[in-house]
């Protein structure tokens, strides 16, 4: 299949993508998130971009790529990273982990970690928890990458009506959680292999 290069301005970022893909798919591949209130149905008009050099306005979700392109994304069409509320009030809870150190006496790992993930419509927050005392070691958050398939849950459900699109929705959220795990481990000097339990 033929591939074309698309350059996005003012970011200056370039992606190589197969013929017939939409500009929305191209932005998604390089992590640029556009406003996609209707989930790419072409009805909300929020994903307008300009094809250069003419400046012609098109909807990124409806424009299919058939040549190399340079495209300008106006700020009004971008979904900007929002300030994410990642911390709240600690409440007293009884800590009951499923995994105990005593079952792993021969293992040299000094830490048993758990991960708590909150997948919100707009944001994803992950906390790295010490499974020995329940202490939160670090918190990281990201914009939910599924927003590019629709700003609200109904649009995303409607987007995921085929197995292929459902798999795409799953893939981006898994990549997001994996990215959060890497950040949490870098922040705490730990290793993803030390995470034994995940709650989503
Ligand atoms: S028109 Fe709604 S996402 Fe493109």
Image (cartoon, grey):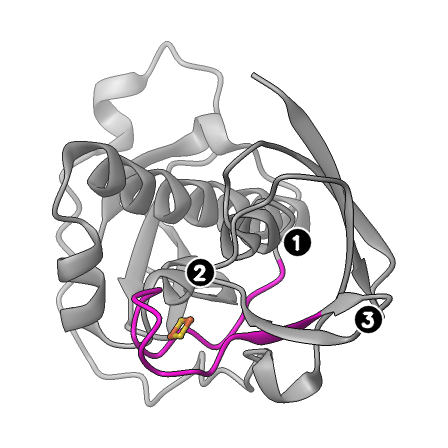
Q: Which residue is mark 2?
A: 62
Would you place residue 26 above or below residue 66 in this image?
A: below
Pick the quarter of the image with the N terminus. Answer: top right
Crowd tier of the residue under label 1, counting other residues whose Cα lies within 10 Å: few below 14, some 14–19, many 20 or above: few
The answer to if 129 sits in the magenta stretch is: no
Would you place residue 92 above or below residue 97 in this image?
A: below
Q: Is residue 42 left or right of residue 142?
A: left
Q: Secondary structure at mark 2?
A: loop
Kindly indicate the quadrant of the structure image that contains residue 45: bottom left
- Place of residue 124 in the rendered image (x, y in percent of width and height, measured from the top left): 39, 65
Mark 1 or 2 closer to N-term?
A: 2
Is residue 133 at least partly visible in the picture?
no
Kindly indicate the quadrant of the structure image that contains residue 77: bottom right
Marks 3 and 2, how far apart in space?
A: 18 Å
Would you place residue 16 above or below residue 188 in this image?
A: above
Q: Which residue is mark 1?
A: 187
Which one is in front in this view, the residue at disc 3 or the one at disc 1?
A: 3
């Amino acid at each position: 299949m033929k591939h074309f290069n698309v350059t996005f301005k003012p970011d200056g970022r370039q992606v190589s993508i197969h013929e017939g893909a939409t500009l929305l798919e191209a932005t998604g591949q390089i992590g640029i998130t556009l406003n996609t209130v209707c989930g790419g149905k072409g009805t909300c008009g929020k994903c307008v971009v300009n094809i250069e050099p003419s400046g012609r306005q098109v909807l990124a979700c409806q424009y299919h790529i058939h040549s190399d392109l340079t495209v300008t994304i106006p700020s009004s069409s971008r979904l900007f990273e929002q300030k994410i509320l990642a911390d709240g009030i600690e409440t007293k809870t009884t800590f009951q982990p499923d995994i105990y150190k005593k079952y792993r006496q021969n293992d040299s790992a000094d830490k048993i970690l758990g991960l708590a993930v909150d997948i919100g419509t707009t944001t994803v927050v992950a906390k790295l928890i010490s499974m020995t005392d329940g202490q939160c070691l670090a918190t990281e958050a990201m914009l939910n990458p599924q927003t590019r398939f629709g700003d609200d849950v109904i649009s995303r459900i409607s987007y995921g009506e085929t197995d292929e699109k459902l798999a795409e929705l799953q893939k981006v959220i898994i990549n997001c959680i994996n990215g959060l795990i890497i950040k949490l481990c870098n922040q705490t000097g730990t290793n993803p292999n030390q995470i034994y339990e995940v709650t989503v």
